[in-house]
Image (cartoon, grey):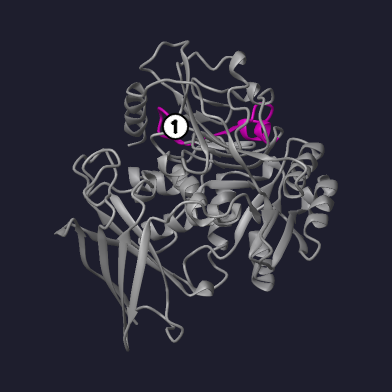
Amino acid sequence: MRALFGALIITAIAATAWAEPSAPLSEFKVRFDANGPYLILATTRADHDFPKAIAAAKVLHPNAVSATCAANDLAAAKKILLAEQPHYILLFIKPDELDVNFAWQWLTICTQLNDDPLVDVCTGVITGSSPEAAEAFVKRISDAVNGHTKLPGRLVDNFGPNSEIGKTDFQQFPGNFMIPALGPRLGLNAISHGTQAFSDKHLDSMRDAGLIHFGGHGHPDQIDDGLRASQVKSLQLSPCVVFNGACYTGVTNRWFDQFTTDGKVVEKTVADDSFCLNFLKTTAIAYFAALHPDHGIPVYQEMEYLAYSGASMGEVIKHTHDGVIISAGGHVPKFEKLAGGMPAPAWSPSEMMLKGTASRMLFGDPSVIVTDPFIKPPFNVETKADRDSLHITAIVSNPLLRSSFADTYFSDLASDKNLFNDRALIAVDLPQNWKTVSGVEVLNATAGGKPLKHRAAGYAIESHARKLWIQVDLPSEGFMQSRFRVEGSAIELKVKQ
């Protein structure tokens, strides 16, 4: 599916009219979310090697609780989390302690702090290739929050290599067909380049962007046929938040290749040329990326969610992980521990994409907020409660949120099985007297007054917020096309206590 996703983007780019990039609009006003509690947690080795970075973080969060534990003792970490029940965790960890196995285990324990299956705490990671790099990362965050530096109101989307244009062609243009909903607030720009075109003369092509997205395939040292880790250190960037959808571009040291000719997993390392570690030396104040094969649509969902929710960075990555859990049927997927020499897991495409998205991490402070909401959410939700049931009507209010209406993992209702289902991801507040939910029934789905095929994909309660999340899947009729994607389309549900 990912290869076809990339091919469809290339086709859409080929039909785009080229012009000069648009200018930035008003700057972002960066701040911390004051909602706590806040925990600064360091691995034992990070506590020893990153003392200045940790001290700087404690200055930023003077009321935070501090703790340490060994990176390989997540049982001890879970005890700390259960005792403190933080809303935010700033996790200091050494690059060689972080891999996809750690990411999956960390995600799992972060769903085990109460009795619901969703993520219970927002995590951001601080690491660096040296103590100085980790300290500088914290300082950049401090400078942005304190107003010493500014994030421009411009988004640059580097789609990655385009095989339909010349190998050395480089095209930059205004607008963005993937995230048009963000246009009222941001100067939207996109880059498409040939497979040999991201040369050093283009290192300034993302200057003046407060938000940056990278697409394409990837490895720990590069975006394939695109930006290389060795070039990253020389990028000319403004302070920015970066969303990277290329595979493995969150790897800081150890990674696992499960796509081998002999069917065995191979353990590999990248250190001196880690794309992630090099990006953490730039002016970025937050960096979202995966430690395993990723795929593109959830990354656009992160940007859309940021725009309509005004969420903190930690809440953005939590929303991604919660989406994995809800799409998987309302439970945390089973994560096999990868090791060199083991047989490659026989995952279906849906399992690969679910687990790859679950490996996405936020590098940066999870409590950072870069914007208030500036666009309408995907749905207007109306509820009516009676004695033992809740009737919900979710009405499409912003069909320009293209990725938010994509299931991203399943294709059973799609007219083209190489594409994704559409979805409605709906959140409702539960009545105060409700303790649990015994079932969710989809009464109907309609577009233009006509019924649509549908299925309930999953639901879960977010206990501390008393919020119910429900996903309903719908047929798609092309790449991010369906009859449902029209203002006024509706889903009606009945929730039983």
Q: Which residue is farthest bottom?
A: 387
Q: Is residue 215 left or right of residue 76?
A: left
Residue 176 in the magenta stretch? The answer is no
**Position above or below: 66 against 252:** below
**Position above or below: 461 against 53:** below
Question: Where the N terminus falls, by quadrant?
Answer: top left
In this view, the residue in front, 248 or 299, is 299
The residue drawn where x is 49% and y is 13% is 196
Question: Where the C terminus falls, by quadrant?
Answer: bottom left
The residue drawn where x is 32% and y is 30% is 8
Task: Describe the element under mark 1 as helix, strand or loop.
Answer: loop
Residue 153 appears at what percent x and percent y? 59, 39
Q: Is residue 153 left or right of residue 480?
A: right
Residue 319 appears at what percent x and percent y? 49, 56
Please state which amino acid type lies under the numbered disc 1. Answer: Gly
Q: Can residue 144 be seen here?
A: yes
Q: Which residue is farthest left?
A: 450
Type of secondary structure dominating the magenta stretch: loop
Residue that numbered label 1 is attached to: 175
Residue 261 in the magenta stretch? The answer is yes
The residue drawn where x is 80% and y is 42% is 135
Q: Which residues are magenta?
A: 258-280
Residue 204 position by quadrant: top right
**Position above or below: 43 against 34:** above
Residue 56 appears at what percent x and percent y? 82, 50
The crowd level at tag 1 (other Cα within 10 Å; few <14, some 14-19, many 20+) is many
